[in-house]
Image (cartoon, rainbow, N blue to C red):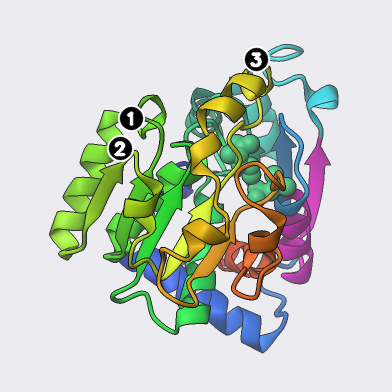
Amino acid sequence: MKQDLLSIVDLTPTEAAQLIEQALVMKQGGMRCLLPWRSVALLFEKPSLRTRVSFELAVTQLGGHCLYLSPQEVGLGQREPVPDVARVLSRYVDCIVARVFKHETVALLAQSASVSVLNALSDLEHPCQALGDFLTIRERLATLTGVRLAYVGDGNNVARSLALLAGMMGVDFAIATPQDYRLDEATEAGVRGLAASKGSSFTVTDDPVLAVSGAHVVYTDTWTSMGQEDQADMRRKLFAHFQVNSTLMAEARPGALFMHCLPAHHGEEVTSEVLNGETSVVFDQAENRLHIQKAILAQILIPAD
Ligand code: CP
Ligand code: NVA
């Protein structure tokens, strides 16, 4: 049976934890030919460096084959209806990895495809990013237990997947955003429920200092996500007090890790000093996309006995 990954909550907490442990094993053990002759389509409506390269390499290193389909050649929903694209690709490939503007598009692909569909970023979520980031935290801090993660900036797709995964894994999560850029109520309620079930905390504030206080990890992302470029000037002004700089990092635990999914805008959401600082793990995060996606692909494409 096919298994889609559209939202991080499509996984159980146990499955998410197993993927992280499996990725650690794969990272240490090098490459194994787990997916011979499997084909994966990368169907992208938006630009990408990390996601495209790490998925292509993940599939190749597992012995499969990847096809990159650019927005121009497919014209998803324009040249051809989304369900037809899903049905056609299902006749050729074993998995569709899709990066889309609207989350409904990846949901419609999954509904129409007979093969598994993975969300490689939508306006709502970036589940592969969150899993790779928790792999990075697990690697750097040796555990997820007792970890306090602070997110500062826009309540966007990356923030949503991180908040939900934190709730699932029992990681304390604090998020500081301008009032109008909080996560939506349903997500906040979902994270609150997950955190309560795990005995972890969930703090929502508009005060970056409060959010990072006592944090082991400080995370930020762009203030202007792909598709919001016309709001960039307004957002730069609105988010000016949410920059992660050395003054803010000094409010976190000594030696706190700095994380960013990249691409970063130096001097906006983060200073170059912090991004290039000793405790920055942004390039580990980029590398770990490869390892976590190998674990995800192996889990989804290898039928259980
Ligand atoms: N972090 C991330 O998803 O990067 P890309 O947009 O370059 O894929
Ligand atoms: N929030 C960003 C993440 C990029 C990886 C965006 O959606 O553009």
Q: Do the residues labelled 3 and 1 touch (CB within 8 Å)?
A: no
Is residue 53 magenta-colored? yes
Is residue 79 magenta-colored? no
Quarter of the image where one finds residue 282: bottom right
Q: Which residue lies furthest to the bottom in this view?
A: 29
Residue indicated by mark 2: 187
Residue indicated by mark 3: 81
Q: Which residue is drawn at 73% across and 59% down?
A: 54
Q: Amino acid under label 2? A: Thr
From the top left corner, tell me how far across and down residue 22 is, in percent: 51, 77
Observer able to see residue 69 = yes
Above or below for 167 versus 111? below
Secondary structure at numbered mark 1: loop
Q: Distance between the residues labelled 3 and 1?
A: 29 Å
Q: Are marks 2 and 1 in contact (CB under 8 Å)?
A: yes
On the rendered structure, is 200 left or right of 31? left
Q: How far apart are marks 2 and 3 (CA)?
A: 30 Å
Q: Which residue is drawn at 48% across and 57% down?
A: 248
Residue indicated by mark 1: 184
